[in-house]
């Protein structure tokens, strides 16, 4: 058995292993997403029982094996136990864990995602913040850290930073008003008077989403903001609906299956 190491992270997945053990997935600062086993963690009197639940954040002392770790001790700094008394917010939290698990590969760089996940779970505890807004912020910022941020600061066709008017899903960014409806832009108005971005594609949905200035600024803020300022704002209902639609459709470009925890979240009309 090799030397022990200390992993700082959050438990994002748990499962039984054997008769009394637990198999856990930890999003760590040092080694990204890792699989670990906690021997005897399911025994009623085990000191590892509470320390190996979902959301637990702290330092894990472990032996590193060929394909997994063996956790022998845990110093939990935050259990987020209040989540278990608020099922609605807990469901959002479980979704955030699943999304983090989906995007991170084993042993990849997980420092940014760990910080984002920790701050996001904390944000769920702020009663003045709507969990649905926390969700959309987390989804978009996850894509930013994954390296596939949408272009929301300049037109994806001509490069101008002025008069940005439409988020074009297939182009992964915004179009200016000229490129979205100009006669020489390639997105010219149709004979029926509708610009191409507003015409449903084969999937039955419009290719583009009209943005007002507040919605555009909100998207820009999420993409560019530091973690410390990420969960410090509210938006109107109309802005939320626009931003939510953009993020939901954009996320589907990079998630190729339905995440299991989505069924527990409120459905948005």
Image (cartoon, rainbow, N blue to C red):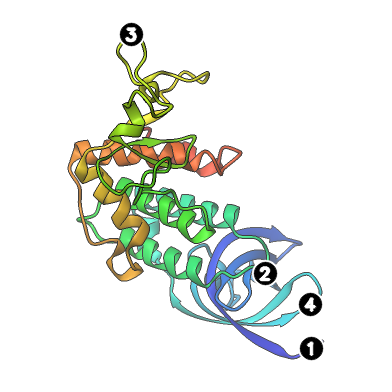
Nearest the camera: 51 or 152? 152
Q: Nearer the viewer, residue 12 or 229?
A: 229
Q: Which residue is mark 2?
A: 107
Tag 2–tag 4 contact (CB < 8 Å): no
Verify CB contact (< 8 Å) between mark 4 and mark 1.
no
First in sequence: mark 4 vs mark 1: 1
* Front label number (4 vs 3): 3
**Going from the N terminus, do you reach mark 2 or mark 4 first?**
4
Residues marked 3 and 1 touching at CB (< 8 Å):
no
Comparing marks 1 and 2, which lies closer to the viewer? Answer: 2
Q: Classify mark 4: helix, strand or loop.
A: loop
Name the element at disc 1: loop
| Label 4 with label 3: CB-CB less than 8 Å | no
Q: CA distance from mark 4 to mark 1?
A: 8 Å
Q: Residue at x 32, y 26 (%)?
A: 181
The residue that mark 4 highlights is: 65
Does residue 199 show up? yes
Please, what secondary structure does the residue beneath circle 3 have? Answer: loop
- C-alpha gap between disc 3 and disc 1: 71 Å
**Label 3 belongs to which residue?**
192
Quadrant containing the C terminus is top left
Residue 236 lies, in percent from the top left, at 17, 42
Number of the front mark, 3 or 2: 3
């Amino acid at each position: 058995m090799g030397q022990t190491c200390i992993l700082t992270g959050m438990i994002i997945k748990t499962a039984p292993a054997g008769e009394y053990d637990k198999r856990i997935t930890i999003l760590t600062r040092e080694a990204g997403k890792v699989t670990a086993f906690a021997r005897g963690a399911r025994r009623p009197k085990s000191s590892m029982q509470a320390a190996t639940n979902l959301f637990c954040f702290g330092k894990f002392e472990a032996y590193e094996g060929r394909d997994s770790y063996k956790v022998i001790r845990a110093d939990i700094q935050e259990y987020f136990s209040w989540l278990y008394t608020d099922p609605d917010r807990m469901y959002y939290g479980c979704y955030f864990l699943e999304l983090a698990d989906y995007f991170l590969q084993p042993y990849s760089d997980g420092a940014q995602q760990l910080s984002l996940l920790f701050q996001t779970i904390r944000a769920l505890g702020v009663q003045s913040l709507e969990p649905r807004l926390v969700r959309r912020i987390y989804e978009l910022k996850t894509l930013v850290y994954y390296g596939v941020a949408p272009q929301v600061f300049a037109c994806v066709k001509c490069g101008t930073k002025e008069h940005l008017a439409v988020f074009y899903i297939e182009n992964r960014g915004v179009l200016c008003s000229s490129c979205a409806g100009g006669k020489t832009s390639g997105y010219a108005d149709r004979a029926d008077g509708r610009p191409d971005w507003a015409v449903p594609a084969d999937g039955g949905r419009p290719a583009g989403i009209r943005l007002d200035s507040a919605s555009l600024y909100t998207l820009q803020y999420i993409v560019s903001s530091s973690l410390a300022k990420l969960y410090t704002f509210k938006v109107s209902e109309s802005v939320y609906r626009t931003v939510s639609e953009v993020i939901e459709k954009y996320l589907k470009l990079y998630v190729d299956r339905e995440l299991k925890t989505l069924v527990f979240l409120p459905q948005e009309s």
